[in-house]
Image (tube, helix red, strand yellow):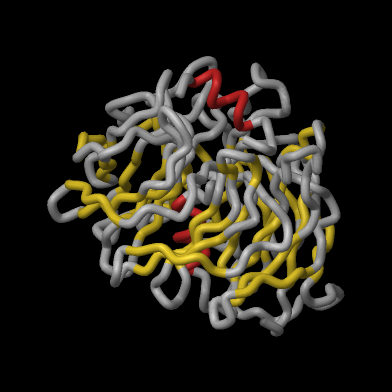
Amino acid sequence: MALMLAASACAAPSASPASSSAASASAQASASASASAASTPGQTANTWSATGRMHARREFHTATLLQNDTVLVAGGDSGLSTDKLASAELFDPGTGTWAATGSMNEARRNQTATLLGNGLVLVAGGINATALASAELYDPGSGTWTLTGSMVEARAFHTATLLPNGKVLVTGGSRTDALASAEIYDPDTGQWTATGSMHEARADQTATLLPDGTVLVAGGSGSAKLASAELYHPDTGKWTPTGSMSEPRVFFTATLLPTGRVLAAGGSGFNGSLTSAELYDPSTGAWSLTGSMTAARGYLTATLLSNGTVLAAGGGSGGGGGLQSSAELYDPALGTWSATGSMINARFHVLMAPLLRDGRVLMAGGDGSGSTLAAAELYDPGSSP
């Protein structure tokens, strides 16, 4: 898949890590699953409310919950393919306001952002004029970025997963074509080393850390959209094939549930955006269909809430249906989806919608029907499932 083709496909609802869910977003959601879900004073449960606007309009950016409970938003673009952003800003959930922080050394979009065990944030790859190999670290204590070792290969539309040993696994993505290669970042040395390559080249795939420490990579696109999945074994650095999804998916989400299963939802298939969802069972290595969403969504976000349900929001419906402002909840116990409050703004191209420590979900920026957004809003799940 050529880089320019990948970039243009991202702009089409029917054609994202985003995220796919970006793997770091899934990790943040899982890490925050014990947060209180008490309703915020002044906000009705299961609804969205406006919060402060970002300083810059941005889409294809990253959003990372820091150890101090603020959210770091970095990079993206302002709506023009030539207008990549180096700027970054911090959201304070307590005040609902944004504050500028240090800018990255390189402007980039479709990068990954991973919260490391030491509290720093690793941003890697992405696109400027071409795919980038550079990586940099954000220090919340000083509000500054420093360059760290560059990746072995330049890549965008890739995944980054924090492993139990504190290292970061980066997989696939695209440079000029989809990549099968993978590499490991070691925070102690600041260096990258190649590890085993995947069986299939893929970009815009998902990557999910499983309870046994392996990493499930699924879907994406190579020479075509993929249904296949494979497992990375950190102890050997090798990949093994596992069961394939029921249909090819790209720009979908993968969420680790409290049961240990993985929920794959929506995305784009051969005939446009999808309503279908399916579950991966690590004990059998097989996928099974579960309830379908109420709306077709490509480039949606999915966030594991504190009560164990999954919030799916926004996305492009394709087929002339435009963007979604609607949101819905998946109940793992029932295997069904139900509508919840709609967002104030229809949007997609949001790679991450992080779960805050107080149980709310932050949705910031994205593409709102052809206009890149600075608007942000908060979802309050209250105490109901």
Q: Quadrant of residue 49?
A: bottom right
Nearest the eye: 334 or 361: 334
Residue 327 is left or right of residue 270, and the answer is right
Q: Quadrant of residue 293?
A: bottom right
Confirm whether residue 146 shows in the render.
no
Q: Residue shown at 51%/25% (left/top)?
A: 127
Quadrant of image for the N terminus? top left
Q: Residue shown at 28%/33% (left/top)?
A: 181
- Residue 131 image point, x, y percent: 45, 22
In this rendering, is residue 45 above or below 371? below
Confirm whether residue 230 shows in the render.
yes
In this rendering, is residue 257 above or below 21? below
- Residue 115 image point, x, y percent: 44, 52
In this rendering, is residue 325 above or below 304? above
Q: Residue shown at 63%/74% (left/top)?
A: 336
Residue 124 is left or right of residue 353, and the answer is left
Quadrant of image for the C terminus? bottom right
Residue 43 is left or right of residue 232, and the answer is right
- Residue 378 image point, x, y percent: 75, 61
- Residue 156 image point, x, y percent: 46, 30
Q: Residue furthest left?
A: 236
Residue 357 is left or right of residue 152, and the answer is right
Q: Quadrant of residue 178?
A: top left
In this rendering, is residue 385 above or below 357? below
Q: Residue shown at 65%/45% (left/top)?
A: 273
Nearest the eye: 230 or 168: 230
